[in-house]
Amino acid sequence: MALRAIAATLILLLIIVMSCLGVADLVDPCCKEAGGGFQGMFVFGSSIVDNGNNNYLDTLGKANYFPYGVDFSPLGPTGRFSNGKNLADLLAQLLRIPLLPPFLDPFAATGSTILHGVNYGSGGSGILNQTGSITGKVMNLNEQISNFEEETLPKLESMLSCTRQQMLPHYLILIAAGGNDYQFNYFLSGSGSGSGSRPGGAGAGPAGLHSFTDDLISAYSHRLKRLYKLGARKFALIGVNPIGCVPVVRAANKRCRCQKDMNSAAKLFNKRLISLVDALTVQLPGSHFVVVNAYNIINDILHNPASKGFSNVKSACCELSITGILCKGSGGVCPNRSSYVFFDAQHNTEAASAIIASKAYSSFNISQVYPINLQKLSRL
Ligand SMILES: *[C@@H]1O[C@H](CO)[C@@H](O)[C@H](O)[C@H]1NC(C)=O
Ligand SMILES: *[C@@H]1O[C@H](CO)[C@@H](O)[C@H](O)[C@H]1NC(C)=O
Ligand SMILES: *[C@@H]1O[C@H](CO)[C@@H](O)[C@H](O)[C@H]1NC(C)=O
């Protein structure tokens, strides 16, 4: 009798354990049906998406102090280069993905928190290895992908008991990169100003710009193919903003005008990016790429701010530090952040990023999001 009771108990326990495994299967991205939205997202790129990685790096490019995060309640300053949410947060929200942990945060990016993805974005970084070194240490795009490959993927594979090739098609790869390669590399080195060229650099003028852009797009292509080889299939690439119109650049110009050469560079990059994704879509079976033309979206606001509820498109909302780029620690802020396009002299307010996010998610205008929007991408 006792033996029978023990056997019955064991069988009961087995049933309970098996039904738990059954429940776990429901959230297992390996078994997920297509078309049901994303399991999560992996974020790569610059300060447009950095959500706190630079806090852990030896760099001047940090945003982990007030007034950054003034509207990011309840956490306040987190390292996001914004008064509130950044573009990655806002896109995640539209795609129903929870806020992601920053890769370098030793407490946040552990255990099951990584099931919905990880953010590797690093302020000041670029597509090219050397971009951003003037601000100190940054994680460049190659290093970000290496961390994803060597640290995150093995953990996820053991947590989910499936391979990267099985799980990654259910995640979005979001990348916002390229602007710093122009602003803090090409133009800073003198190549873009027409006043000389850096040693071994691309040289001044339109020829230099074209050859630099070719190199940049080819480097980007390598990085994207690397991610594809790991199993990634769905990509959202944020194009370069009108970098000639950010307050720090305007401040250096007569009558606060935009810098045309920098804007031309951004437009050229975005055009080449579209040709690149057209080519990659053919070369890489099963891949889907979306380009968000942040240039066109922001440019519309700059030309017609009132229509989008903005009243200031030229200056930073916060009091600036002596660098003229980032906010001064504990400095003043404008009372109404949603009427400013720029929070500091380089980065958008949450209000401006929210417009980019909403166009990226649901616009049918291919000048804004090409060839399909993210809502459609999530349903493929
Ligand atoms: C960039 O760095 C990666 C390692 O992170 C290296 O494999 C690659 O060769 C470097 N590229 C260039 C152009 O130096
Ligand atoms: C399409 O997008 C471009 C760039 O944002 C914009 O200038 C244009 O007005 C839009 N066209 C329509 C029909 O909305
Ligand atoms: C702040 O700006 C937004 C957008 O311009 C506007 O709708 C709102 O009324 C403003 N709020 C205050 C308190 O002025």
Image: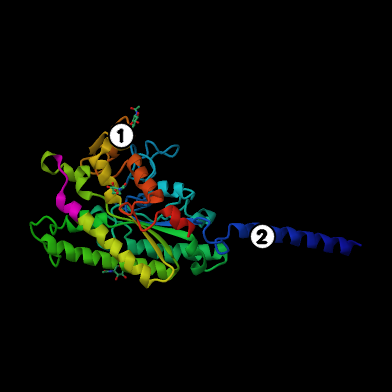
Residue beneath the point at 76% across and 59% down: 13
Where's residue 112, x and y in %? Answer: 54, 55
Q: Main secondary structure of the magenta part?
A: helix
Closer to the camera in the image, 221 or 380: 380
Mark 1 or mark 2, which has the lower sequence index? 2
* Amino acid identity at mark 2: Gly
In this view, the residue in front, 15 or 332, is 15
Disc 1 on helix, strand or loop? helix
Q: Which residue is mark 1?
A: 339
Quadrant holding the N terminus: bottom right
- The residue at which mark 2 appears reads as 22
Residue found at the far right of this picture:
1
Would you say the residues marked 1 and 2 are in contact, meaning their CB atoms lie under 8 Å apart?
Answer: no
Horizontal arrangement in the rendering, residue 206 relative to residue 32 (left or right): left
Numbered range of the magenta stretch? 256-264
Local crowd size for mark 2, using a 10 Å CA cut-off: few (<14), some (14–19), many (≥20): few
Q: Is mark 2 within 8 Å of ligand 1?
A: no
Judged from the image, the secondary structure of the residue bearing numbered disc 2 is: helix
Image quadrant of residue 78?
Answer: top left
Q: Is residue 212 left or right of residue 95?
A: left
Amino acid type, label 1: Ser
Q: Position of residue 229 (x, y in %)?
A: 41, 71
Residue 223 vertical position relative to residue 367 in the rendered view, above or below: below
Residues at marks 1 and 2, CA–CA distance in whole angstroms = 50 Å
